[in-house]
Image (cartoon, rainbow, N blue to C red):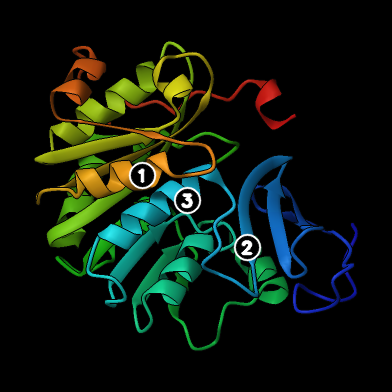
Amino acid sequence: MGRSRNSGRGRAAAEAVVETVDGGLARLVPDRERPRAWTLLIDDAPQSHVDLDDPAYLSFEYQRRIGHVIDTAAPAGRPVQAVHLGGGAFTLARYVAATRPRSTQQVVERDARLVHLVRRELPPDPGARIRVRSADAREGLAKVRDGWAGLVVADVFSGARTPAHLTSTEFLDDVRRALAPGGVYVANLADGPPLAHLRGQIATAAARFAELALIADPAVLRGKRFGNSVLVASDAPLPIAELTRRAASDPHPGRVQHGRELRDFTGGAAPVSDLAAVDSPAPPPSVFR
């Protein structure tokens, strides 16, 4: 097992940190273009990218899209109360803390050894109000007070797959319970052709929320390749025009679907219950090459 002699707080030419965590073999790899930035991989699957000098910088495409949702979930700069299901390297919690100072956040991350590694090597700003709970995402969500959260972010993967119990209507019932009126739920969903999992997740969210939008690479939406899609749900109207503008201006432009177009995309898929839920599909080996 290799260890850097100095953490992400140290020199630019840092070494990779390699350590076994509960979820597999974790590697923190330095970004050669950004002196204090690191990518977290678990069993060679990229999980997070963090720039300690600029926590508002989001390197991963899907995280930038979630960032757009965070930016539009409340007036600019206003603090929010956020729950993050899945911690990784706390990238999105750091982003909220940087862009919305004085926000209060709860991160639920099952992998306690990963949490220890990230805290040691890539410590968050001590002034950020980020509480980390080492627990299963659904168990941690159940401990959030009714109506506490203005924002719930779900980005949970185990072995590059979303666990089945985080894909059901019963799970979304608890998300809704934790959300304040008008609060926003945003989820990272991974799927490839024929997109049966993604369509089922949209149908599941539609059974519990009045307003939905989906942000994704057009090639993913056409079923041309495996990739991430960002699902946004709320009981209040969503800022579709602004999300569309932001997604289109990304380095890898995304497309926003909503309304009838999104219903048509779902193609008659049925909502998923706990009894019928399965893990999301495993990505093909070529995805991480």
* Image coordinates for residue 247, horizontal then vertical, percent: 39, 42
Q: Which mark is residue 228?
A: none
Nearer to us of marks 1 and 3 is: 3
Nearer to us of marks 1 and 2 is: 2
Local crowd at mark 1 within 10 Å, few (<14), some, or many (≥20)?
A: many
Q: In this orientation, does residue 217 appear?
A: yes
Q: Against 241, is 33 above or below?
A: below
* Three-letter code, disc 1: Ala
In the picture provided, is 128 more to the left or to the right than 177? Answer: right
Q: Residue at x 46, y 13 (%)?
A: 193
Mark 1 → mark 2, Cα distance in angstroms: 19 Å
Local crowd at mark 2 within 10 Å, few (<14), some, or many (≥20)?
A: many
Q: Are marks 1 and 3 in contact (CB under 8 Å)?
A: no
* Image coordinates for residue 166, horizontal then vertical, percent: 36, 41
- Sequence order check, earlier mark of 1 and 3: 3
The quadrant the N terminus occupies is bottom right
Please give the residue where the numbered disc 2 appears in the rendered image. Answer: 50
Q: Residue at x 45, y 37 (%)?
A: 163
In the picture provided, is 236 more to the left or to the right than 267? Answer: left
Please give the residue where the numbered disc 3 appears in the rendered image. Answer: 64
Please give the residue where the numbered disc 1 appears in the rendered image. Answer: 187
* Three-letter code, disc 3: Arg
Mark 3 → mark 2, Cα distance in angstroms: 12 Å
Q: Are marks 3 and 2 in contact (CB under 8 Å)?
A: no
Mark 1 → mark 3, Cα distance in angstroms: 13 Å
* Image coordinates for residue 27, horizontal then vertical, percent: 77, 53
In the picture provided, is 61 more to the left or to the right than 173? Answer: right
Residue 4, picture quadrant = bottom right
